[in-house]
């Protein structure tokens, strides 16, 4: 089943590379030590790479949002209110119990439904909540002179940074779970092959 | 427009059960707003420029300030038998306002200058008067022991400025006797203090008129020299020149060992790290009381923020626990999958 159009695949691969660079450079900046000049990367180099990569990712993100508006891809992200919690419960039960007992997938992938309820809500939160927040706070840190000095008596930069690193952490955790859940296809690499070729192998479970 | 938008969002924040989310959106919708007109920005009224001090020597000092307090002075020339108006030599002008808020504000002019100056016209030989130095009064005095002036003197003698003594460099070049005021030790507004401190350096280093009196070097352009520094304007506004150009000494409050440019700090992680250099220099005063609670808590209420240094221990711990939990759940899941695969 041809599920992932070319632009989605290119965007996805591109974002994956950029996000990995951003996580590595971000951790380097956050945990740099005075005596150990290198954590993962030298601070100055990490800043340069982080800044450069983040600008490209922001452009790529704008492209993704535009793509979702202009094409049919956006429909996959529409979260319905009907059975919202029970559907998520079903999917969670499947991941934690059902699939280990050999049960059928409660929400098999179709052309109309690319994402299961858990995927859908996590993608929506990541792409439409976490990403805008990390981009806006990132702009605030990249251009500190435009960031407000104080917010209710606390440094605006500290708050901006706290939001940025919190979102960065949550996105890193998302990436970890995302990569793992992508091994839950027919075979551990089936879903990875799908996002590269565009064809989704139908799932038994 | 921005302000009314922010107000609306604030109301929503109070009413909604998603307070936290709204608060975050509010913070960052205003992050890019101009700091000047921001609704929540509390305008700080600086009291430092309001001089409330009344000197016991005000009237005596005024006899000097009447001529030395402004550019124009008048005197009666007895030879000519008439009033003469003249322009005061700029180096001899003392600004009253600066003087009465300086460290030496409680002094009478003649505490340091000869009583001979009370005569007019001033006797010519007073021009050769030997000026006091800092150590002449501050050295060997128990009242100043905590400031360790002897160590300051020792540091100064190793500094690159000391080499210019023959050219006329003295303590007064930075610590003007008529205007210098202690700033960092009891600073209420760190940015104002930083500006004041940096202006002391720039008084010579960005003013070739003065600079050339002490050195044969060509005029330097501070902005071009610091071209390599990322976010130059932000750095200049938030740290003192001293942070990178001196060697930190924990025995004195402000390091006086000003190094040559070759020895200046250039590594980002000297400051942008958990054990930031700034802890023992710029934030020494602010955070010394709260340092046991950690860097973040020590300076949370001021405007300072240093990427890499303001690491929050609580967030670190929480994120570590979450990370371990996720990895643990994945590991358990993998184990169950492997078991199932073997069974089928």
Image (cartoon, coloured by chain):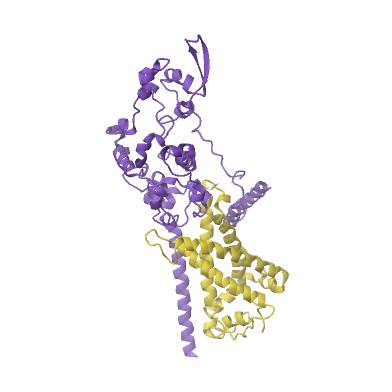
- In-front residue for pair B39/B90: B90
- In-front residue for pair B46/B158: B158
Residue A114 occupies quadrant? bottom right
The correct choice, above or below, for A180 with respect to B250 in the image is below
Can see residue B282?
Answer: no
Residue under the image location 52 percent in, 45 percent down: A153
Q: Position of residue A200 (x, y in %)?
A: 63, 83
Drawing shade for chain A:
yellow
Tally of numbered discs: 0
Q: In the rendered image, which quarter contains the C terminus of chain A?
A: bottom right
Q: Is residue A120 left or right of residue B88?
A: right
Residue under the image location 57 percent in, 56 percent down: B20
Q: In the rendered image, which quarter contains the N terminus of chain A?
A: bottom right
The correct choice, above or below, for A186 with respect to B141 in the image is below
The correct choice, above or below, for B73 with respect to A65 in the image is above
Drawing shade for chain B:
purple
Q: Position of residue B65 (x, y in %)?
A: 46, 21
- In-front residue for pair A71/B273: B273
Q: Position of residue B102 (x, y in %)?
A: 43, 30
Q: Position of residue B264 (x, y in %)?
A: 40, 51
The correct choice, above or below, for B194 with respect to A162 in the image is above
In the displayed orientation, state which residue is furthest to the top: B81
Can see residue A186?
Answer: yes
In the displayed orientation, state which residue is furthest to the bottom: B344
């Amino acid at each position: 089943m041809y599920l992932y159009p070319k632009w989605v695949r290119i965007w996805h691969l591109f974002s994956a590379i950029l996000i990995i660079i951003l996580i590595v450079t971000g951790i380097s900046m956050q945990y740099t030590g005075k005596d150990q000049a290198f954590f993962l990367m030298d601070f100055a180099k990490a800043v340069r790479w982080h800044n450069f990569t983040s600008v490209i990712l922001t452009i790529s993100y704008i492209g993704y949002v535009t793509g979702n508006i202009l094409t049919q891809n956006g429909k996959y992200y529409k979260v319905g209110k009907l059975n919202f919690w029970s559907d998520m419960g079903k999917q969670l039960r499947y991941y934690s119990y059902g699939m280990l007992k050999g049960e059928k997938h409660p929400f098999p992938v179709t052309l109309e439904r690319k994402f299961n309820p858990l995927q859908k809500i996590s993608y929506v939160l990541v792409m439409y909540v976490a990403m805008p927040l990390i981009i806006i706070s990132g702009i605030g840190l990249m251009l500190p002179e435009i960031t407000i000095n104080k917010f209710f008596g606390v440094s605006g930069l500290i708050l901006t940074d706290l939001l940025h690193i919190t979102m960065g952490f949550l996105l890193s955790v998302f990436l970890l779970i995302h990569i793992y859940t992508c091994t839950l296809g027919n075979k551990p690499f089936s879903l990875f092959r799908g996002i590269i070729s565009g064809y989704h192998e139908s799932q038994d479970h | 427009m921005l302000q009314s938008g922010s107000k609306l969002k604030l109301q929503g924040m109070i009413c909604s059960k998603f307070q936290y989310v709204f608060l975050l959106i509010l913070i960052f919708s205003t992050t890019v707003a101009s700091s000047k007109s921001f609704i929540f920005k509390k305008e700080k009224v600086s009291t430092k420029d309001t001089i409330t001090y009344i000197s016991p020597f005000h009237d005596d000092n005024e006899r000097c300030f009447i001529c030395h307090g402004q550019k124009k002075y008048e005197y009666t020339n007895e030879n000519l038998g008439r009033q003469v108006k003249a322009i005061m030599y700029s180096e001899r002008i003392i600004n009253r306002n600066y003087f009465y808020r300086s460290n030496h504000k409680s002094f009478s002019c003649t505490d340091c200058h000869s009583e001979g100056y009370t005569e007019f016209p001033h006797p010519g030989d007073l021009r050769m008067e030997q000026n006091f130095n800092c150590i002449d009064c501050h050295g060997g005095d128990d009242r100043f022991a905590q400031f360790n002036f002897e160590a300051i003197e020792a540091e100064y003698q190793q500094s690159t400025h000391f080499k210019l003594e023959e050219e006329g460099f003295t303590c007064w070049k930075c610590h003007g006797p008529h205007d210098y005021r202690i700033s960092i030790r009891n600073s209420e507004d760190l940015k104002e203090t930083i500006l004041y401190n940096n202006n002391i350096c720039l008084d010579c280093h960005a003013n070739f008129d003065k600079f050339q009196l002490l050195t044969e070097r060509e005029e330097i352009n501070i902005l071009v020299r610091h071209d390599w520094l990322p976010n130059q304007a932000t750095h200049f506004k938030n740290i003192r020149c001293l942070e990178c150009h001196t060697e930190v000494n924990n025995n004195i409050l402000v390091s006086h060992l000003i190094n040559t440019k070759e020895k200046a700090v250039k590594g980002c992680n000297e400051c942008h790290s958990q054990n930031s250099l700034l802890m023992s220099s710029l934030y020494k005063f602010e955070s010394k009381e709260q340092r046991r609670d950690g860097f973040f808590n020590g300076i949370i209420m001021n405007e300072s923020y240093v990427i890499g240094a303001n690491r929050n221990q609580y967030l670190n711990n929480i994120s570590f626990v979450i990370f371990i939990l996720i990895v643990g759940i994945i590991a358990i899941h993998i184990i169950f999958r492997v078991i199932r695969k073997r069974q089928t």
